[in-house]
Image (tube, rainbow, N blue to C red):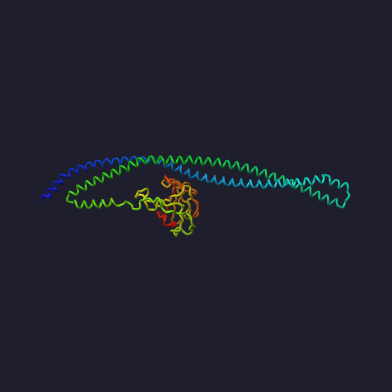
């Protein structure tokens, strides 16, 4: 009995102290909640401002893709011009060699005519010492004259062709210089656009980083205060008749808090290598599971179904493949382009329709090589790997949709050894 009275007295002494501590913790918790609410308002306002920056980002990254395509086309034209210039140089050399040979033959004929004498036919006619050979000799001289005329005509034609080729070479060189100037201009524009994109990304990062860190700190403080308040409430509850039940509930809650949120939440920064090599699959897409090549050579850095950026509320509905910037992105199966444009969150995006409700998506590209409505074959290049959509490092977002539902690409593409 005495022991029970002592316990009751101790409880009466401890309870007010816990009650005061609970009141202080509650005040701090309310203050933390108010700060969190204020920070959320600031973030909402910043989100409105961010939409304007997103529009600038869309414009610059779309322009980057177009400029990349123009640079590639100009480079191809320059290569063709250089090949044509080499062909003309070879033709010029052949004509020069032909001219030298023709000059040599004309010289031989000129010397023969000089040695024979310019009036030999006339002397033969006047002398008439051999009348039976007269007709035959005149025919011989006539042939020689015609040969000289033909040789001179051929020589003149060679000179004309040589002059035309030299004019073509000069024109081709001028065209090549113009193409080089245009290519340098496009590259300068591309560099300026890239700089503009970097500034836009820097603005996004600087605007969000400080406020996001502050919000996380206040949320953590709120959580800690909530745990303190919960501990106090549990302590007060243990002093009542239902202490055992309250303790059991607290233990269950503690066990739930100690369990990992998502065992597979860690991002696999050193995932397996994947390859676009190998024969393409020509059958229907519905029968292509495990038979398709990957769209690019690289490494899986995010798997299907894993949390995005450590947030268990948002999971990957496709995969992320780390690859070199500018690497060719290839269609995993034949189909028709139904979307080729910039999309918020995915950057420059290509979507292929493979029929019967199957779609494949390719995002975060540097440039788009196809347009909506184009028909593509399996293995055909459709884009190049980039960082559009706000990515920091070059990577390809690759996803497969089946009747509008996401499907794990690893089940469709060939496993790597």
Q: How many labels does the image show?
A: 0
Left or right, 246 with reference to 208: left
Return the x and y of residue 13 as percentages of the image width and height: 15, 44
Q: Check the image and name the residue furthest to the left.
A: 1
Drawn side of residue 20 relative to residue 211, left or right: left
Residue in front for this viewpoint, 374 or 396: 396
Q: Decide if residue 239 is on the left or right side of residue 189.
A: left
Residue 93 visible in this rendered orientation of the protein: yes
Residue at point 21%, 42% (across, down): 21
Instruction: Decide which of 389, 414 is in the foreground and name it.
Output: 414
Residue 69 appears left or right of 166: left
Residue 171 horizontal/vertical position (percent): 62, 42
Whole-percent x, y for residue 144 in the image? 79, 49
| Residue at 66% from the left image edge and 46% from the top image edge | 93
Place of residue 51 in the rendered image (x, y in percent of width and height, measured from the top left): 40, 41
Give whichever of 376, 181 is nearer the camera: 181
Report if residue 375 is visible in the image.
Answer: no
**Residue 96, image quadrant:** top right
Tell me the quadrant of the picture where the C terminus can be found. bottom left
């Amino acid at each position: 009995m005495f022991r029970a009275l002592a316990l009751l007295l101790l409880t009466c002494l401890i309870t007010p102290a816990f009650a005061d501590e609970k009141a202080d913790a509650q005040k701090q918790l309310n203050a933390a909640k108010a700060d969190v609410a204020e920070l959320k308002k600031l973030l909402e306002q910043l989100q409105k401002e961010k939409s304007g920056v997103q529009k600038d980002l869309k414009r610059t990254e779309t322009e980057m893709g177009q400029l990349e395509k123009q640079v590639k086309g100009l480079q191809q034209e320059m290569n063709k011009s250089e090949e044509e210039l080499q062909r003309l140089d070879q033709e010029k050399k052949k004509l020069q060699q032909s001219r030298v040979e023709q000059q040599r033959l004309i010289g031989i004929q000129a010397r023969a005519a000089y040695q024979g004498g310019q009036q030999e036919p006339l002397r033969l006619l006047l002398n008439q010492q051999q009348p039976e050979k007269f007709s035959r000799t005149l025919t011989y001289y006539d042939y020689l004259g015609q040969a000289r005329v033909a040789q001179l005509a051929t020589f003149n034609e060679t000179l004309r062709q040589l002059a035309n080729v030299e004019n073509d070479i000069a024109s081709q060189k001028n065209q090549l210089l113009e193409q080089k100037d245009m290519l340098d201009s496009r590259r300068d524009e591309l560099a300026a656009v890239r700089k503009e994109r970097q500034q836009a990304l820097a603005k996004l990062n600087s605007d969000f980083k400080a406020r996001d860190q502050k919000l996380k700190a206040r949320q953590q403080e709120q959580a800690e205060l909530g745990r303190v308040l919960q501990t106090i409430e549990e302590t007060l509850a243990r002093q009542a008749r239902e202490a055992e039940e309250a303790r059991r509930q607290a233990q269950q809650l503690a066990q739930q808090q100690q369990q990992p949120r998502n065992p597979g939440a860690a991002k696999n920064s050193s995932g397996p290598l994947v390859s676009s090599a190998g024969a393409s699959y020509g059958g229907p897409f519905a029968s292509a599971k495990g038979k398709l090549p990957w769209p690019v050579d690289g490494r899986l850095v995010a798997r299907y179904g894993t949390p995005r950026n450590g947030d268990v509320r948002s999971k990957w509905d496709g995969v992320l493949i780390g690859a070199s910037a500018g690497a060719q992105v290839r269609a995993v199966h034949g189909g028709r382009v139904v979307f080729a444009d910039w999309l918020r969150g995915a950057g420059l995006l290509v979507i292929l329709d493979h029929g019967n409700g199957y779609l494949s998506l390719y995002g975060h590209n540097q440039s788009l090589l196809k347009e909506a409505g184009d028909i593509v074959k399996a293995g055909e290049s459709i884009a190049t790997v980039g960082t559009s959509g706000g990515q920091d490092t070059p990577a390809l977002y690759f996803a497969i949709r089946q009747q509008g539902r996401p499907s794990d690409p690893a089940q469709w593409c060939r496993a790597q050894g």
